[in-house]
Amino acid sequence: MNRRGGSDRGGRDFRSGGGGGSSSLMRRNDRNGGRVEKRFDRQERNGENLRAIRWDQEKLDAFAKNFFKPASSVLDRSRAEVNAYLDKNEITVIGKNIPAPILYFEEGGFPSSILAEITRQGYKEPTQIQAVGWSIATSGRDMVGIAKTGSGKTLAYILPALIHISNQPRLMRGDGPIALVLAPTRELAQQIQQVCDDFGRRMSVMNTCIFGGASKMGQANDLRRGVEIVIATPGRLIDFLESGTTNLRRTTYLVLDEADRMLDMGFEPQIRKIISQIRPDRQVLMWSATWPKEIRKLAEEFLRDYIQINIGSLNLAANENILQIIECCQEYEKESRLFKLLAEIGKQGDNKAIVFVETKRKVDQIAGIIKRNGWRADGIHGDKTQKDRDYVLNTFRRMNNGILVATDVASRGLDVDDVKYVINFDFPNNTEDYI
């Protein structure tokens, strides 16, 4: 039995096959409903009626995108010092004319309002992806960031977005967003919006979050009023573009977050349609946890002279700080083993846990059984309304203990910091979901 404290987390995973099965203990504090968002987005349009813009025939106003104004300490740092930092943190940077990294918040040239919010939130120093990514992004360069969830990538592209926006002409009536962030799922989109809210209010930058499975009316009203940042899932954005609710003619800063996940979920056609609506001299930042050939192809096609940042190895690997435990059992034994494990977890002081199962039906079944056995538990899956999903997630986040049951495809973006145990009741279908 594994007991974790602080930010370390663990979980257990049951699977069966043939005469027996196995399970493993792992951390999964970054889950979301990938398949759920796909289900909703499939109800939206795929862009068949969206007319491609002939940008070579359009008159485009010039815009600025290089705002890199580092402190003298950044420019004075020797190549040996920079290389030592990169080596120590397992950072690989590939490209031409790479700007020097920002090792301290005060070196980045951020306005005092941003630095005040950084201090308020208790950040001590930039993460690896922030240190290297901020200088690249504020220089106006295209970039690819390969980093695991939890690397601080959201702030790595949101702060440069705010700087970019503050240096553009103000929005006029009928203008679309200046910055667009595409994300695969509603949960991730909402988490990105929270970061935009925290830092954007310091610079009077407005945003909206649009995704499938929620009412279009409020989202449409936000778009019509005009916002500088739109965070969107691909299908719902396509729907608003086709209806003329918004446009991307003012968009000069594009972010593709969890690009590998979006491609896995079949969003490549929508991504291509959306990019066709954005001027070709835009700045593009692509973020991914992996670097498969499909992502490489997308980067080569839509990014120009880009810089690539790799944090750690490009090969998938389980977190070394997580104890992985595998148990072999018969299918009929899984339920009793689950309850024995939950009883062990319940003896710990902080015992918040997530249980992943394969189907939505099993979510309701297992959550019900757990509750009948006296534990605080609830389930989340794609057949629940957005209101119910938000309520369950927010309640779980506030708990000091409790159990959340979810489908095993909820594999990214569900950010719950204090989960210490994750149980895979049904083994995930592929390595990527497991990691």
Image (tube, rainbow, N blue to C red):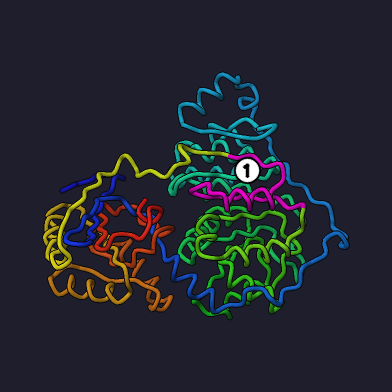
Residue found at x 17% / y 55%: 328
Residue found at x 56% / y 39%: 309
Position of residue 301 in the picture relative to residue 287 (left or right): right
Question: Would you say residue 224 is visible in this rendering?
Answer: no
Q: Nearer the viewer, residue 271 or 264?
A: 264
Residue 112, above or below 416? above
**Residue of label 1:** 111
Q: Position of residue 105 (x, y in %)?
A: 54, 36
> Furthest residue to the front?
18
Q: Is residue 291 magenta?
A: yes
**Which quadrant of the view contains residue 366?**
bottom left
Q: Nearer the viewer, residue 177 or 36?
A: 36
Position of residue 244 in the picture relative to residue 393 (left or right): right
Q: Nearer the viewer, residue 231 or 225?
A: 231
Position of residue 388 in the picture relative to residue 5 (left or right): right
Span of residues in magenta: 281-308
